[in-house]
Image: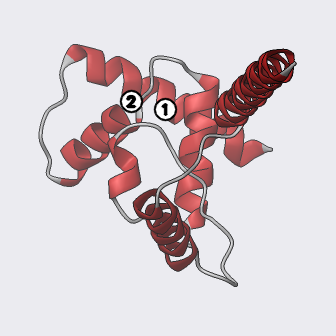
């Protein structure tokens, strides 16, 4: 009679072990799903994100509107808003014109240096566009 109770106890222990394994498997799968959906972040990654946000905030002036940007090297030179607007109009009218080409032609004229044939063509196009802009 003692032996059937002992077998029953062993069966109960086996059932409890299987339930514990099933629970552990469920917890592991939930943890892996949570990591896949939102991976845990290290302290270093959190600090790095905070520092990047602080850098972006420090770079943005609060009350000043951003200036218009022009493609090419013109961004590195300081231009007035009127100059930027005029260069944007020039670039929009003729696709051959680039900020560097306009600067090169202007410097050649300022320094009394002869233009190449291509630069002469571009200067003629610039003069025509400027004449059209002035008559508007």
On the rendered structure, is 111 left or right of 123? left
Give the position of the C terminus as an image quadrant. top right
On the rendered structure, is 64 left or right of 98? right
On the rendered structure, is 112 left or right of 88? left
The colour scheme used to paint the residues is: secondary structure
Q: What residue lies at 74% left-to-right and 30% top-to-bottom?
A: 20
Instruction: Identify the residue under disc 2.
Output: 123
Q: Quadrant of residue 23?
A: top right
Residue 61 placement (x, y as % from top left): 59, 79
Q: What residue lies at 81% left-to-right and 20% top-to-bottom?
A: 15
Q: Nearer the viewer, residue 131 or 42?
A: 42
On the rendered structure, is 27 left or right of 131? right
Q: Quadrant of residue 132?
A: top right
Separation of disc 1 and disc 2 at Cα? 5 Å
Residue 35 placement (x, y as % from top left): 64, 35
Q: Quadrant of residue 31?
A: top right
Q: What residue lies at 63% left-to-right and 25% top-to-bottom?
A: 93
Q: Which mark is residue 99?
A: none
Residue 22 placement (x, y as % from top left): 77, 22
Crowd around label 2: few <14 · some 14–19 · many ≥20 (10 Å): some
Q: Which mark is residue 126?
A: 1
**Above or below: residue 1 compared with residue 31:** above
**Above or below: residue 10 compared with residue 98:** above
Crowd around label 1: few <14 · some 14–19 · many ≥20 (10 Å): many
Q: Are marks 1 and 2 in contact (CB under 8 Å)?
A: yes
Q: Secondary structure at mark 1?
A: helix
Q: What residue lies at 80% left-to-right and 26% top-to-bottom?
A: 9
């Amino acid at each position: 009679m003692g032996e059937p109770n002992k077998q029953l106890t062993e069966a109960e222990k086996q059932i409890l072990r299987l339930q514990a394994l099933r629970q552990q498997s469920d917890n592991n799968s939930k943890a892996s799903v949570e990591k896949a959906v939102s991976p845990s972040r290290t302290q270093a990654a959190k600090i790095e994100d905070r520092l990047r946000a602080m850098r972006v905030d420090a770079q943005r002036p609060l009350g000043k509107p951003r200036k218009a940007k022009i493609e090419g090297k013109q961004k590195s030179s300081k231009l007035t808003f009127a100059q930027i607007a005029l260069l944007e109009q020039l670039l929009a009218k003729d696709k051959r014109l680039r900020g560097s080409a306009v600067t090169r032609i202007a410097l050649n004229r300022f320094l009394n240096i002869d233009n190449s044939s291509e630069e002469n063509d571009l200067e003629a196009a610039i003069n025509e566009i400027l004449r059209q802009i002035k008559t508007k």
